[in-house]
Amino acid sequence: MRYWFPYPLLSLSLLMLWLLINQSVSPGHIALGTMLGVVFAWIMVNLQPDKTRLKNFGRIAVLAGHVAVDVLRSNIAVMTVILRAGRRPANSGFVAIDISLRDENALALLACILTATPGTAWLEFDRQTGVLLIHVLDLENGAVWSDLIKRRYETPLKEIFE
């Protein structure tokens, strides 16, 4: 059975997502969603992702809370930048941050967090030097951003993944 369904949870999740997107549980959508789930699971087998073992489950909830609060704060900050655009333009800029994360899944999650937070964008990560380059919409102090990302995101991700 494992041969036909290499990632059963992925296949099931993709089927559920397909049914939610189409807002239908007709037999045709169930068959098509099942077929897509199995095909995409086989594609994942060919990609051969690294197996990740989560180490500190308590930090996951803390990290999720930090991300939720930071997304809310960033939404408010971006709104104020937009509303005050006529009086004072945004001071956008780039910040280079030394990151010591090496786990690919932790780096991918950090990229998702930074990209999902309004006002920031993950631009580049150099694996050899460990330097992450991000863009910030309203940059006042790059050291504050570097400290925030290292303290609020990198440290918990290291505890969870490494």
Image (cartoon, rainbow, N blue to C red):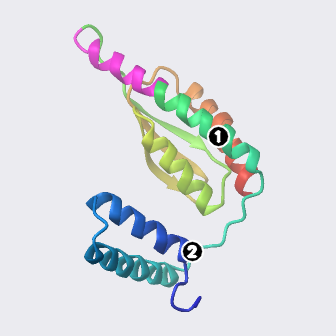
Give coordinates of residue 68: x percent, y percent.
Answer: 54, 34
Packing grade of label 1 (10 A; few <14, some 14-19, many >=20) is some
| Predominant SS along the magenta part | helix
Could you tell me which quadrant the C terminus lies in? Answer: bottom right
Q: Read off the magenta span.
A: 73-86
Would residue 61 be found to the left or right of residue 22 on screen? Answer: right
Could you tell me if residue 51 is visible in this image?
A: yes
Q: Earlier in the sequence, mark 1 or mark 2?
A: 2
Residue 80 at x, y percent in the picture: 35, 16
Q: Which residue is mark 2?
A: 49
Q: Is residue 28 above or below residue 86?
A: below
Vertical order, 12 against 75 (above or below): below
Asked which secondary structure carries label 2, the reply is loop
Say which of marks 1 and 2 sits in front. Answer: 1
Residue 149 on image: x %, y %: 60, 36
* Quadrant (top left/top right/bottom left/bottom right) for the N terminus: bottom right
For the residue pair 151 and 88, the one nearer the viewer reads as: 151
Identify the secondary structure beneath mark 1. Answer: helix
Q: Which residue is mark 1?
A: 63
Amino acid type shown at disc 1: Leu
81 drawn magenta: yes
Q: Residues within 10 Å of mark 2 (few under 14, many from 20)?
A: few
Q: 116 above or below 38? A: above
Give the residue drawn at x 54%, y 77%.
8
For the residue pair 79 and 8, the one nearer the viewer reads as: 8
